[in-house]
Amino acid sequence: MTVNGKKPKFAMYWAASCGGCEIAVLNIHEKILDVDANFDVVFWPVAMDAKYKDVEAMEDGSILLTLFNGGIRNDENEHLAKLLRRKTKILVAFGSCACEGCIPGLANLGNVGEIVHTAFNTITTDNPHEIYPRISFDVPEGELHIPKLAPMLRPLDQVVDVDYYMPGCPPESHQIAAVVDLVIKVVKGEAELPPKGSVIGVGDSTVCDECPRARNVKTIKSFKRIQDIAPVDPDLCLLEQGIPCNGPATRSGCNARCPNVGAQCIGCYGPAEGVIDYGARLITAFASVVDAKEPEEIEQILDGIPDPTGQVYRFNLAGSLLKANREAWKVK
Amino acid sequence: MSEKKQERVGVYVCHCGSNIAGVVDVFDVASWAEENLKHQGVVIAREYKFMCSSLGQELIEKDIKELGLTRVVVAACSPHLHEKTFRTAAKNAGLNPYLVELASIREQVSWVHTDKAVATKKSKAVVAGAVSRVIENVPLEELKVPINPNTLVVGGGIAGIQAALEIANAGFHVYLVEREPSIGGHMAQFDKTFPTLDCSACILTPRMVEAGTHPNITLMTWSEVVNVSGYVGSFNVTVKKKARFVNEELCTGCGICEEKCPKKVIDEVFEAGLGYRKAVYTPFAQAVPKYPVMDRENCTYFIKGTCKACEKFCPTGAIDFKQEDQLINIEVGNIILATGYDLFDARRVSNYGYGRLPNVFTSLEFERLSNAAGPTNGNIVMRDGKTTPKSVGIIHCVGSRDKNFNNYCSVICCMQGLKFAHLVHERTGATVYNFYIDMRTAYKAYDEFYQRVLEEGTLFVRGKVAEVTNAARNEHERGKLIIQVEDTLAGKQRRIPVDMVILSSGLQPRADSKEVGKLFGISCSTDGWFTEKHPKLDPVATMTEGIYIAGCSQGPKDIPSSVAQGAAASARVLDKILQREVALEPIKASVNQEMCSGCRICNGLCPFNAITFHEDLMVTEINPALCQGCGTCVAACPAGAISGTGFSDQQIMAQIDGLLLRNLEPVGV
């Protein structure tokens, strides 16, 4: 990786996201100094002031590494995604939103009208005059614009070509630190980049692999919410206790943080390597271990999962097989 | 896909006479495939009148050799029918048979569409899917496993007996398992058989004795199969041998225990509730085996702790009150299910009054009434046990051809009703009415029997009986059973008073047929009859290799058909045994151990016990010799760590892409 004697350029951007990914990057503590020491940070809205036009003025391919977090929800997101793709050598879909849509992707269950209505006209939002945002508005100083919502939220790779994926909501700090170390080594010529399209900063199996809980042959008589079970056995597989834990289909890399502290895995690290459609995999897995023969009984047990879509597609509805074009699985 | 070497694909579109070509423009499909799927590797696409003919196969073989094809797609019928044909053709030409895919444009296109343009377009999509898929296929080798020459026959009715004898006579061992104390089945309960009126017992009992004494038959009566594992060639079966409380080694079948037993019980099974048996009993005189069975629920000793009359009088000391149920493991290569039928419960047709009106009888009750060895010594009398009826009404289609009960025709009831009419007429001289919807007397000598009964003077009323009642409207009807019926030939409602009514009940699947089907891994129709592999061309095989069906468990049928099916099933088994080994489809699941995290979701799912969990490594493994490729674990694995050969994600996704015409170069459809 040649750098022409200068420090390579680094950028980070947030599209439709919550900001947690930025915090996770800052959460690598003193390692952030290594980033500063090895990179020239040219664009990072949360940390420094920069204008889009500054980025537009940069030479194509001049940024070595961009961590792009957030999904593509509006035309501003899309513009920045395309812009940064043009300017960047290594574009990383950083965090669950950019990789697979995450929580904002659940809005794909409704259309734009419904989303706006929900946001501006609910019990908690008093809107007697039915005032909704407009794309453009005339003021004495001229015409003001706000970004236009797209019909669907799309993960980054449905909009531009992505080099690497780093899942997690947010990615674990130790994984970010490891990736930063790797890139610095690559810059110094001490290591090679993994093949394009790889998922980085992750383990190679599922959350179960890192989970210390004991496991048996599974049979489930009923699904329960974790607060409805008292006490939760601290040493036994949560799924065996009837708690719908997404660990079996979820990529490892987080050290099974949630199951370790007694909460079920909700799947933020996304589908494991062999999984094409995460939700379909999970629901067939859950259904396979339901211990019932009669259709009514089976239905009753599955009804114990209060929000099936939220349970099995919480993080990747936008990146799933049916709700998106299938680039999402093809690149993996 | 770009790194892969380009495959050379041949596409063969079959006309199937006019079956496909009548609806699909096969010429267009072939030329379209050659033009538009070229970039995927299609080097030749041909259409032909009958691809499955030897000329059609030669066409493919020639192309494989001359054009160096590496993949073949045949757009024709369902793989069910001719996959084997074309795989064999490929094999003959030196191509691995698993590099051939069938695109079903008959069952899935021409037979279900009428619009030619749409059907042609869909055929193109199906072909494109098959081409995309076949490129992802990998060569597979069949596994050969030896066949255990022993056979299990479940059910000792006439179908099961026939099957067992055929195999045993050919020199191979048979385990014949029967739930009741004796073999013989329903046929043993009948007096006469239609249409020849020969004595049922006279023709059946020699077969029963032969089966009971045959050196190659291990008879296991009062026994049930409780577990089955394994696959064709090597099934492992657990049989529960219920305690008889009679030591079969010591018992001579002298019958003294039965004679001395003080406890009388109504015999609901063999005598259809019309007669008594003892608490220790053989169901009928010619029972095979001869050893009696003790009915634990009714035995005085088991209830009160005293009696033991049988033990005291038994000359050989064969009574053993301490006997327990035994689980016996047997290993067999093939299984024939001949589990028979249940009689439709006539109580369900409440308007016919069975169970409420004493002189309404079921067909099985009448069989026992008319049987010389039955409770009345063959005298046809009314419920009081002495009065001979002067008029008898026989109602056909009870519980059959009726939307409220069973939609199907039970096949035997018309002939059964005619037989009853003949017997009543012959033995009582009573006036006999038969009430029928349609008279169904197909098969050899059946209609002649109908003519004979007509000539005997039996009166036939065409119409479905609405009600049987004892509510008399006039003096003429008083004390009688009145049959209310619409006579559809005379075009009027009639009320016909009779002394006795016989309900020609239909046949039903066994109450537990679905559970039994599940136990043996075969499916049932919605009614509950076992499903055959092909309704016409493979009526005794099932979709599970090594499991065959015969007799009424497959659907209602008469004695000759049951015997024929028993023999047919045994011929299929003998064919398997004589091949000595069987080639198993190489469709197997396997675990990518790197990806398996030992979540154990799949562990309890395998119907063939092929899954093992390694506690030490926390990974799951599948035994390829036991795996049947059913795909249950493949679907269940949440990590996508299990994949099935022949059905990999790559193959399936590629096929979907093809079906959606995503793989086309931008030339359009």
Image (spheres, coloured by chain):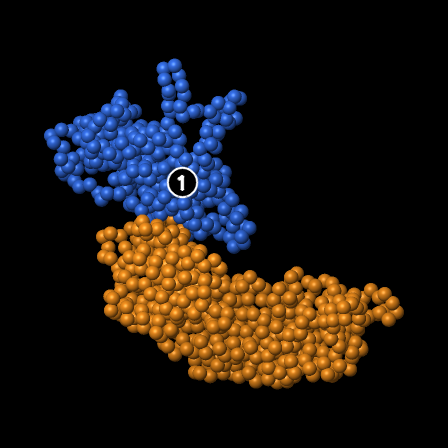
Where's residue B328, x and y in %?
47, 70
Residue denoted by label 1 = A317
Apparent side of residue B428 relative to residue A57 in the rendered image (left or right): right
**Compared with residue A126, is residue A191 higher up or lower down, i.e. above or below?**
below
Residue B146 shows in this picture: no
Residue pictured at 78% horizontal, 67% vertical = B492
Q: Which chain is blue?
A: A
Disc 1 element: loop
Between B360 and B256, the one nearer to me in the picture = B360
Between B123 and B292, the one nearer to me in the picture = B123
**Compared with residue B468, is residue A159 higher up or lower down, i.e. above or below?**
above
* Residue at the extreme right of the image, as rendered: B475
Between A268 and A68, the one nearer to me in the picture = A68
* Residue at the extreme left of the image, as rendered: A5
**Compared with residue A126, is residue A332 higher up or lower down, i.e. above or below?**
below
Residue pictured at 37% horizontal, 23% vertical = A145
Q: Which chain is orange?
A: B
Where's residue B140, x and y in %?
30, 64
Residue A312 falls in which quadrant of the image? top left
Residue pictured at 24% horizontal, 34% vertical = A86
Residue B479 falls in which quadrant of the image? bottom right
Residue B243 falls in which quadrant of the image? bottom right
Between B477 and B293, the one nearer to me in the picture = B477
- Give the crowd class for mark 1: few <14, some 14-19, many >=20 residues within 10 Å: many
Residue A12 shows in this picture: yes
Where's residue B61, x and y in %?
30, 70
Q: Chain of mark 1?
A: A
Where's residue B474, x and y in %?
87, 67
Residue pictured at 52% horizontal, 81% vertical = B211
Instruction: Inspect the image, locate mark 1, and give the three-letter code of the amino acid beneath it.
Output: Leu
Tell how many labels. Answer: 1
